[in-house]
Amino acid sequence: MQQYLSIDDCNLAEFSKSLDRELQQNEVPLSHDIINNVPVYDVSKINFLSDTKSLRAEWANVLHKSAGVIVLKNAYPDTSFIDIATAVYEKIIADEKAASGDKADHFAASGANDRIWNSAQKLCEYDPETFANYFSNLAVDTACKAWLGPNYQMTAQINLVRPSGAAQSPHRDYHLGFQTKEIAETYPAHVHDLSPVLTLQGAIAHVDMPIESGPTKLLPFSQIYRHGYLAFSQPDFREYFENNYIQIPLNKGDVLFFNPALYHAGGANISQNIHRMANLLQVSSAFGRAMESLNRSEMTRRLYPVLSANKHNLNDAEINSAISSCSEGYSFPTNLDTAPPLDGLAPETQANLFRRALREKMSVTDFEEALLLHNENKKA
């Protein structure tokens, strides 16, 4: 059994072979259409108030072992809720631009598009009635439960791509998809298997999205490839993606869901006048939490004077072990308005701030100020 995956073992021929298949109707008997290997479900023909266990089972299978993506047509049959939410989001964009300018993004240069981080909380705070109508959607709820089970955690980010907005590079998503391939390689193979089942990616179309507006580029079945978190940044894999991706046009009120390990990328908006707006859903499993609540900031503040004083007999590896048991070693959750992903895809972690402070021989006072700023930037 392979316990660690290696970048050197990424094999394009093996990858392409795993994608060489065609989705059959008997694999998705509850779907209403199949477009480019993507099953399409017409929500207007589904009764979500009845038992949806069979539907949830089919969707989970598609996301896990089959195409990796589903499209829910007419998920919002009354698009007035979408329009009202769009107006709120446009106001938030204007307010945030007036306050602080353009937002940093994971894949686009600042100013290339409009981004609202934490759009779910902001919508609820600006207009809780609209939030209620928007997020009471049973199709969305059923998809989240199909992949994650009950008690899921909803987060969302508005992405508005203007005409001439460039395409993204192909990638996988949160969690391991937000790590460099070198960091991903340090995680055991079973964590590569586990990461995709911890989150679900979605997109609610706020406008009609014909192909020229750049709806998400998708590579069906690509989530199945085990080395995918290491391979997606490799030039030959990126070239394969660009030569084989598909796109599905969406109408306002349609919703797209996909496995976070599916290779995908935002498309180029080559339209003349379509401002492509989608609310990007990132839904997390309820189980992605520790058993106890620790005040890691206070622990970090108290440990730094000990490790920085050089009065201990610990070597570098032992120092790293102590920091790992003390400080927060993961960038998320965070406030991406104040702690944007400036280098790579994730902000600096508390543990890496600790290690950097030791390298730079930061004074205790300076470290405490840096730690305080780090904590403030993470707050909602």
Image (cartoon, rainbow, N blue to C red):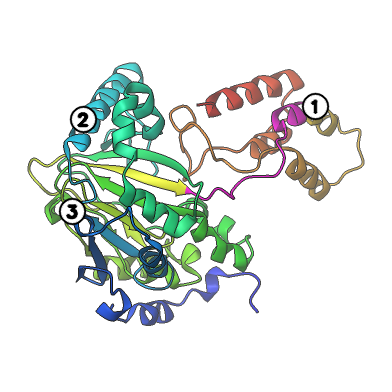
Secondary structure mostly taken by the magenta-highlighted segment of the chain: loop
Three-letter amino acid code at the position of disc 2: Ile
Q: Marks 1/2: CA distance?
A: 49 Å
Where on the picture, by quarter, is residue 313? Answer: top right
The residue that disc 2 covers is 84
Helix, strand, or loop for circle 1?
Answer: helix
Q: Earlier in the sequence, mark 3 or mark 2?
A: 2
Q: Is residue 275 visible?
A: yes
The residue that disc 3 covers is 250
Q: Earlier in the sequence, mark 1 or mark 3?
A: 3
Three-letter amino acid code at the position of disc 3: Leu
- The mark closer to the camera, 3 or 2, is 2
The reply to whether callout 1 and callout 2 are in contact (CB within 8 Å) is no
Q: Is residue 133 left or right of residue 62?
A: left
Is 286 inside the magenta-drawn segment? yes
Q: Is the residue 230 above or below the residue 66 in the image? A: above
Chain part drawn in magenta: 284-301
Q: Which label number is shown at residue 302?
A: 1
Q: Residue furthest front?
A: 50
Q: Marks 3/2: CA distance?
A: 19 Å
Q: Quadrant of the N terminus?
A: bottom right
Residue at (21%, 70%) from the top-left corner? 36
Q: Is residue 105 left or right of residue 25?
A: right
Is 60 inside the magenta-drawn segment? no
Question: Where residue 11 sits: x, y (%)?
Answer: 45, 77
Three-letter amino acid code at the position of disc 1: Arg
Residue at (65%, 39%) from the top-left corner? 352
